[in-house]
Amino acid sequence: MPLIWSLGLLVLANGAPVIAHRLLGERWAAPIDAGLRLADGQALLGHAKTWRGLITAVLVCAPLGALQGMGWTSGALFGLLSMLGDLLASFIKRRLGISPSGRARLLDQLPEALLPLAVLREPLGLDWLDVLIVAAGFTFLEWLVSPWLYRLGIRRRPY
């Protein structure tokens, strides 16, 4: 059961910002990097990484963490860590010259999955093999579901 709960937390943490964008459009969508560009000419993170998305992930994961038995605080921390992993991936993608919302298989999924799973491994009741299994499951699930979410108009890109 810990693997399913952990996968559920990942799906919620990463799905909440997408749903928030779908429901709210550009309202409260202030970019985390405030439009900052580095010496390479690329944005620090990109316009799609917003405070609304980060806060939404934290707020959605907190009650699920409580339901799962790890507590509200650990649930919120899970959402925060997942978004920090996503921000790290965006930072790396910008340095590699990949445009905002551009595709980078594995880099788009693994940091946002591995960071919260590794840090909160014990409260989640996972061992290291479980962490890898859940991260791989999340990656494959995203690869399978993203094209459908795009067709339904929920995601802006089919990946």
Image: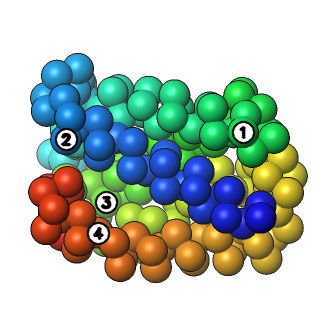
**Disc 1 designates what residue?**
67
Nearest the eye: 134 or 89: 134
Q: CA distance from mark 3 to mark 2?
A: 24 Å
Point out the frontmost of discs 3 and 1: 1
Please tell me the numbered disc located at residue 11: none
Q: Secondary structure at mark 2?
A: helix
Q: Residues within 10 Å of mark 2 (few under 14, many from 20)?
A: some
Q: Residue at x 43, y 50 (%)?
A: 14
Quadrant where the image shows the C terminus: bottom left
Please tell me the numbered disc located at residue 22: 2
* Pointer 2 or 1: first along the chain: 2
Query: As drawn, is 60 to the left or to the right of 23?
Result: right
Point out the frontmost of discs 2 and 1: 1
Please tell me the numbered disc located at residue 93: 3
Q: Secondary structure at mark 3?
A: helix
Q: Is residue 12 visible?
A: yes
Q: Amino acid at mark 4?
A: Ser
